Amino acid sequence: MLFIAALSLVFSSSVSDDSSLPRFAEPVLNVTVIQGKDALMACVVENLQKYKVAWVKVKTQTILSIHHDVITQNERIHISYNDHRSWYLHIRNVNEADRGWYMCQINTTPMLNQKGFLQVVVSPRIIAEESSAGDIITREKTDVILKCRAGGYPEPYIMWRREDGKDINYNGVMVNVVDGEDLHLMKVSRLHMGVYLCIAANGVPPPVNRRVSLTVHFPPMLTIPYQLEAAYLGKTVTLECLTEAFPPSLNYWTTERGDMILSGDGFEDNRTQTEYACHMKLTILHVTAAHYGNYRCVAVNALGETDGVIKLYEIDSPKEAVAVFTMDEHHDSHKNDKYRSTTNNRISDSFNYEDYYLWQSQGGKNQSKSKEDSKKSNGAACTVPHFCYLPLLYSILRFVFSYVFTIK
């Protein structure tokens, strides 16, 4: 109040006896400025005559200027004017302390004044010391809280999303975005693994984000698509095994004797590795009798070990099957050539597999009956063509169910 009183005394000493008093031509407008930019506030006066204009910061009652002179010691503030009508207050490189009401005064009696508000907005920023670290490592099935704190004015809005765009499993619900400073992830699994973005925005450019990488450690898990593989001599066959582990597991193949299998000597070991999964393929080139048996795929990391077994067994080649069937069924006649092997060792396109499986279901014995008599002797089962496959299917199922596969 002392500043205002002093200002009034200074003003009153220069007041003329002119009865025509000045007036404000327009209000002092509110101004919004981003922190670090320059602010400009205008005061427009008509008929000023010999009166003087002053700028005052209301909150601190600090006199900033009187007429042409800058009073404050703040070097960021200066004054400009135009024909003694428009008076401008300049504030360079504004900061949050500059936010508030500013008054334009005219030293009339009583004093005339108008106020305008300077709003200083601040771009959001992440408060690193109060937010989650850049990398978080945890075990599967534990609870995790990712924290993000941000400053700025107005107060920033904070949300979480995954960097890869995938949905977040949030309390059992798949969502793309989670609002709030804290992201609670309950009983995390390998599916939670990834990079999360904390994004803070308040309408003041630019928005900011913080990357938090969540790594979930878990012991190896193994899946075998086919536990039984069949191959005839000379065929190329591929055994497959799928593993998941983090840290990534050491994956390898062994024979049933425990010998590790490497690429070479008739084997090709191929891997397709992703973040925590591995697709293992063991290709056996030109199968020999020595290749039949059990193969183990093994996955090991610091948290555990697991393995699985694939059995490779022998079957007759299509060429041999056709040849045996042809000789046994038609040894007395060469009339029906559609059951013969072709000279280039490929099965003829006209080979009738239905007849072959019918013959095999009867034990592969030499039959003197005609094909029509043979079908009749099988009764109602072979009146429906697909029933002729039942004996072969039964044999395969007996073999499968006799094999017990365990995963450690």
Image (cartoon, rainbow, N blue to C red):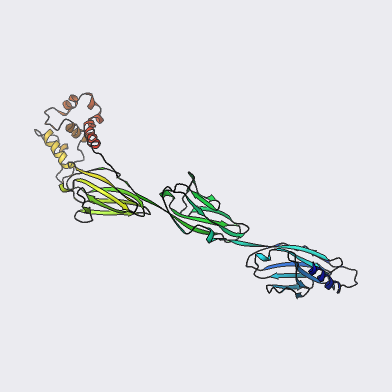
Q: Quadrant of the N terminus?
A: bottom right
Residue at the (14%, 39%) spot, across then down: 323
Q: Nearer the viewer, residue 46 or 18?
A: 18
Image position of 112 with respect to 271: above or below: below
Q: Is residue 252 left or right of residue 363?
A: right
One can see residue 85 in this view: no
Give x and y (percent) for residue 65: 76, 72
Q: Nearer the viewer, residue 88 or 210?
A: 210
Q: Quadrant of the C terminus?
A: top left
Give x and y (percent) for residue 402: 23, 36
Give x and y (percent) for residue 404: 25, 39
Q: Is residue 299 left or right of residue 59?
A: left
Q: Quadrant of the rendered structure where residue 43 is? A: bottom right
Q: Quadrant of the rendered structure where residue 156 is? A: bottom right
Residue at the (23%, 31%) spot, across then down: 390
Q: Nearer the viewer, residue 201 or 87?
A: 201
Give x and y (percent) for residue 57: 74, 66
Q: Quadrant of the rendered structure where residue 226 is? A: top left
Residue at the (30%, 51%) spot, across then down: 299
